[in-house]
């Protein structure tokens, strides 16, 4: 006899016939009766696309500034933020695998049209903030590597749209492969840079130990919130719940269990790589610039000072190459998420090329205007503030995610057990409280991240 919760779950699943990312949904075959590693490789990929959002150019600005100003102290913040991300991304993948819908679709089903439209606008702002970081990061990298003026570099980044369209026609697996190659490039570059910077090992490891100073020092707390906003990315929760559905696994109980196991391994491994990269960026900022009195609040300054500080001529060039790889990588996930939330929240479908051009222009225009008026200093501040915007949007994605995955009427036997539910709500509470504090602190003090 069918359980009551299973009946409710089926009813909930039948409420909407829309398919998330319909053009690539269930497009990647999972081999049957294969060994562990063949199946893992077949499921692996979505985690890499998600991890991209955790090493986008916005992370560079906050992490380098944090390392240069406070040494290794904020490594603990990166660790906690990454652990939060692992749990939340796991819940996001679970929602997509179990229910067959993404977070935006699930939110639309659970709310009225007006609420869904409001949440869509908020999510679009977060995507614009993300895209803004990618546009500025790529433009800065082009300027540093090829001396292309920032304004021209910002315009060149609009061509990323056509690159993504070309890649998507080749298949979703091609996109995942390119992302993995670019992520590996970034990882190798920063391993080299960190080794070259010769960090103080004992001080480095002590940075992963919590200290009360983070909470009582307003400047340190503010940068910490920027790191949180740059690490736990709201748009990634929508993205992950959709792209896990690109796998052609059986939609029965055993098929979902297997998909959950491998997707968790995939995202945990990829986010661990992202954690190492983010830690390396902060370690580089700390070991190269902490206590020197040098101002590296802008990425350009870090580039110009890196080679002289480390005494290695190629260090600055490699830094710029990794920055360009980061910007190009993030282009893919930002535009994909734009499509997912538009279709999910308001059930609006437009041509992929038009959707991506609109998304990119919404980021290019403010970046172009600010660069024109304020130059590189303005883009640096804009880059840092974009991460704060992401941090403020987090609760609007996290709360529905925890609610849905904890509901037996929606998830059936896959609903969060008590310990995960408790931990997820604890993380949600911490995120909400920190962001309320951030908003109040900005309005009271008019704090400037630059």
Image (cartoon, rainbow, N blue to C red):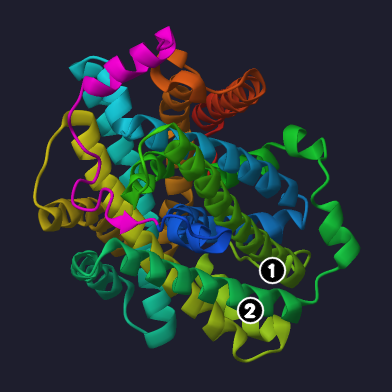
Task: Please give left or right for residue 68 compared with residue 447 in the image.
Answer: right
Residue 363 vertical position relative to residue 145 in the rendered view, above or below:
above
Q: Nearer the viewer, residue 16 or 133?
A: 16
Q: Quadrant of the N terminus?
A: top left
| Quarter of the view holding residue 370 | bottom left
**Residue 186 pos. (x, y %):** 54, 72
Q: Nearer the viewer, residue 383 or 40?
A: 40
**Nearest to N terminus: mark 2 or mark 1:** 1
**Residue 26 pos. (x, y %):** 28, 49
Residue at figure coordinates x 26%, y 46% from the top left: 338
Mark 1 — residue? 284
Please give the range of residues in magenta: 1-30
Q: Is residue 61 visible?
A: no
**Residue 311 pos. (x, y %):** 71, 88
Q: Is residue 27 magenta?
A: yes
Quick check: marks 2 and 1 in contact, CB under 8 Å?
yes
| Quarter of the view holding residue 272 | bottom right
Task: Please give left or right for residue 285 compared with residue 415 in the image.
Answer: right
Residue at figure coordinates x 75%, y 78% from the top left: 195
Residue at figure coordinates x 41%, y 67% from the top left: 179
Task: Please give left or right for residue 312 compared with residue 238 in the image.
Answer: right
Q: Is residue 389 magenta?
A: no
Q: Nearer the viewer, residue 186 or 139?
A: 186
In this rendering, which labeled residue sits more in front, label 2 or label 1?
1
Task: Please give left or right for residue 33 compared with residue 106 in the image.
Answer: right
Q: Is residue 4 visible?
A: yes
Q: Outermost residue toward the right? A: 202
Mark 2 — residue? 306
């Amino acid at each position: 006899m069918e359980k009551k919760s299973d009946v409710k779950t089926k009813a909930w699943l039948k409420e909407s016939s829309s398919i998330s990312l319909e053009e690539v949904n269930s497009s990647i075959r999972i081999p049957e009766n294969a060994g562990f590693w063949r199946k893992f490789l077949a499921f692996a990929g979505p985690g890499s696309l998600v991890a991209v959002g955790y090493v986008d150019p916005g992370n560079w600005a906050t992490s380098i500034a944090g390392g240069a100003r406070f040494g290794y102290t904020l490594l603990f913040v990166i660790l906690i933020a990454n652990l939060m991300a692992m749990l939340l991304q796991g819940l996001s993948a679970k929602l997509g695998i179990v229910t067959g819908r993404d977070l935006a679709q699930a939110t639309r089903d659970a709310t009225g049209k007006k609420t869904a439209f409001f949440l869509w606008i908020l999510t679009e702002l977060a995507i614009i903030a993300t895209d803004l970081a990618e546009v500025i990061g790529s433009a800065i990298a082009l300027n540093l590597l090829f001396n292309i003026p920032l304004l021209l570099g910002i315009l060149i980044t609009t061509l990323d749209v056509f690159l993504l369209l070309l890649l998507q026609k080749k298949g979703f697996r091609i996109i995942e492969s390119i992302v993995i190659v670019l992520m590996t490039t970034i990882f190798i570059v920063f391993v080299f840079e960190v080794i070259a910077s010769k960090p103080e090992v004992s001080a480095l490891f002590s940075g992963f130990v919590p200290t009360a100073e983070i909470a009582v020092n307003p400047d340190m707390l503010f940068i910490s919130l920027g790191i949180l906003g740059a690490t736990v990315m709201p748009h990634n929760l929508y993205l992950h719940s959709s792209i896990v559905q690109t796998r052609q696994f059986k939609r029965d109980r055993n098929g979902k269990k297997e998909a959950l196991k491998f997707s968790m391994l995939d995202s945990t491994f990829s986010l661990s790589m992202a954690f190492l990269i983010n830690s390396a960026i902060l370690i580089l900022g700390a070991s190269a610039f902490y206590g020197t009195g040098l101002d590296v609040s802008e990425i350009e300054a870090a580039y110009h000072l890196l080679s002289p500080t480390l005494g290695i001529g190629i260090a600055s060039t490699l830094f710029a190459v990794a920055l360009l790889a980061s910007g190009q990588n993030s282009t893919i996930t930002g535009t994909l998420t734009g499509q997912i939330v538009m279709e999910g929240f308001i059930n609006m479908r437009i041509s992929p090329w038009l959707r991506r051009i609109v998304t990119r222009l919404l980021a290019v225009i403010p970046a172009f205007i600010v660069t024109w008026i304020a130059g590189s200093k303005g883009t640096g501040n804009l880059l840092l503030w974009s991460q704060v915007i992401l941090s403020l949007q987090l609760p609007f994605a996290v709360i529905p995610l925890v609610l849905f995955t904890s509901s037996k009427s929606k998830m059936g036997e896959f609903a969060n057990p008590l310990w995960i539910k408790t931990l997820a709500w604890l993380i949600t509470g911490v995120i909400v409280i920190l962001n309320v504090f951030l908003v109040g602190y900005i309005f009271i003090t008019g704090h400037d991240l630059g």
